[in-house]
Image (cartoon, rainbow, N blue to C red):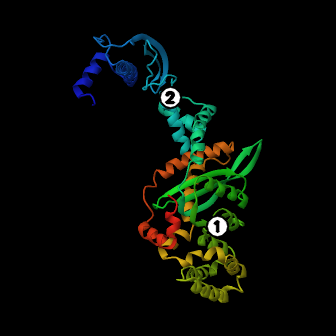
Amino acid sequence: MPATKEQIRQIIAENNISSVSDVYTLLKDSFKDILQELMEAELDSTLGYQKNQKGDMHTNNKRNGHSTKKLKSQYGEFQIDVPRDRNGEFEPKLIPKYQRDISGTEEKVISLYARGMSTRDINDQLLDLYGIELSAGMASKITDKILPKAREWQSRPLNPVYPFVFMDCIHYKVREDGRILSRAAYVVLGVTADGYKEILSITVGANESSKFWLGMLNDLKNRGVKDVLFFCTDGLPGFREAIQAVYPQAQIQRCIIHMLRNSFQYVNYKDLKKFSSDFKAVYNAPTEAAALAELEGTKETWGKKYPYAVGNWENNWEDVSSFFQFSDKIRRIMYTTNIIEGLNRQYRKVTKTKSVFPSDIALEKMLYLASGNIVKKWTQRYRNWDQVLNQLIVLFGERLTCCP
C-alpha cells in the first residue's frame, strides 16, 4: 500500500530531499534495497527457514554467502548481492541467473517497433524518457528475439474447418543486395466456426502469383485445415485453379467491390452514378436467374458505350455468382473482402514510416508484431453469427461437424 503523508514527510526530513535529483537518488537506492530483500526472501522460501532460524529442521542445505551482480535498470546501473545456497539449488525467479538488464528496455523497444517506429525514433524516445541510449543495431538485435515466436506462430496448428477464408496481399519495397525490390505480404484471414476473426498466415514472398498462393493453401492444409466453405478473394488469375487443387469442395466468391472498381475505371465520371445504381440491382438480386436478367438489362443500357465494363462481369460470372444461392446474412460476409482490407489498412498504418525495409525479415517482424496488437481488439463475434451458423449447418452440416 502507498506511504501515508506523514511517512512521506518523515522520509523527506530524514533524507534531506530538496530537489528532483534527490528524489531520483532515493528511488534508486530504495529500489536496490527492495530487490535485495526480495531475493533474500526467495532464498528463505527455497531453504524453508529464515536466516539464523534453522532450529531443529533437518536439511543439509544452508546459506553460502553472496555473489555480486551488476544490474541495469530504469534507475541506472547498480550492484546487488545475490544470495547463494551450499547445494547450488537456488535459482532466483525475481532476477534470473543470467539476466543483467531489468530496465524493461527490450519490452519497450519491441512495443515501440510494433507501432511502426523506426530504430532512430525508438532511440530518441528511450533517451528522452529514460535516459537510455540505444543504437539501431542493438534495437534490431532486440526485435530479432521475437523471430522464433513469429516462426512458431506461422506454423501453429489451425482449426480443422473455417466457414470463411479471405485472401489478399500488400506490396512493400525491400532492399536486397543493394537493390530495391518489390515484395508481397500474403495475408490469410479466417472466420472460425465460433464467428471470430483469426489471422491464419502472413508470408513475405515475391510478387503476387497464383503459384505462391497454391503453396500457402498447401501450408494451411498441412497445419490442419481440412475444409473451407467459402474462399473470398480478389481477381488474381489462377486463383480458382489453386483453390480447387487444394480444397475442391470450397465455394469461391470474387469480391463484388473489386469487380465494381474494375468496371468503374472504364466509365465516364458523368455516367458513374447511374451505372453504379444499375449494377446494384444485379448484385442485390434475390436469385442468380434474376441477377442474370438484371445483367442483361444493364448490358442493353451500357454495353455499347462501355463494353469492357459490362463484359468484365460476364467473363467472371462463375466467380461472382456463388453468393446468390445464400441468404442475405451469409451474402454480407462473403460478397466483399472489406474484412481483410480493413486488416491491411491497419498494417499500412503501422508500416507507413518505412518506405523501404532493410530485409524481408525486418518486414516479417513488423507485420507479426502489428498482428499481435490488432487481434487484441478482436473481441466481438460476427454480427448475427448464430443465425449465420444455423444456416451454414443446414447447408453444410456434415462438413462443419465431421472434423472434431
Q: Where, quadrant-wise, is the N terminus in this rendering?
A: top left
Kindly identify the residue that appears in the image at 66 percent across and 48 percent down.
Answer: 355
Tell me if residue 194 comes above or below residue 110 in the rendering. Answer: below
Kindly identify the residue that appears in the image at 30 percent across and 12 percent down.
Answer: 54
Tell me, yes or no, if residue 170 can be seen here.
no
In depth, the one of 288 and 9 nearer the eye is 288
Residue on which disc 2 sits: 131
Residue on which disc 1 sits: 248
In depth, the one of 107 and 55 nearer the eye is 55
> What amino acid does circle 1 point to?
Pro
Q: Residues under labels 2 and 1: Cα distance?
A: 59 Å
Is residue 23 shown left or right of residue 281? left
Label 1 Cα neighbours within 10 Å, binned few <14 / some 14-19 / many ≥20: few
In depth, the one of 199 and 157 nearer the eye is 157
Total marks shown come to 2
In the image, which disc is placed on residue 153?
Answer: none
Position in image of residue 17 (x %, y %): 33, 20
Kindly identify the residue that appears in the image at 60 percent across and 43 percent down.
Answer: 151
Answer with mark 2 or mark 1, whichever residue precedes in sequence.
2
In depth, the one of 17 and 55 nearer the eye is 55
> What amino acid does circle 2 point to?
Gly
Secondary structure beneath disc 1? loop
Is residue 161 shown left or right of residue 302? left
Which of label 2 and label 1 is nearer to you? Answer: 1
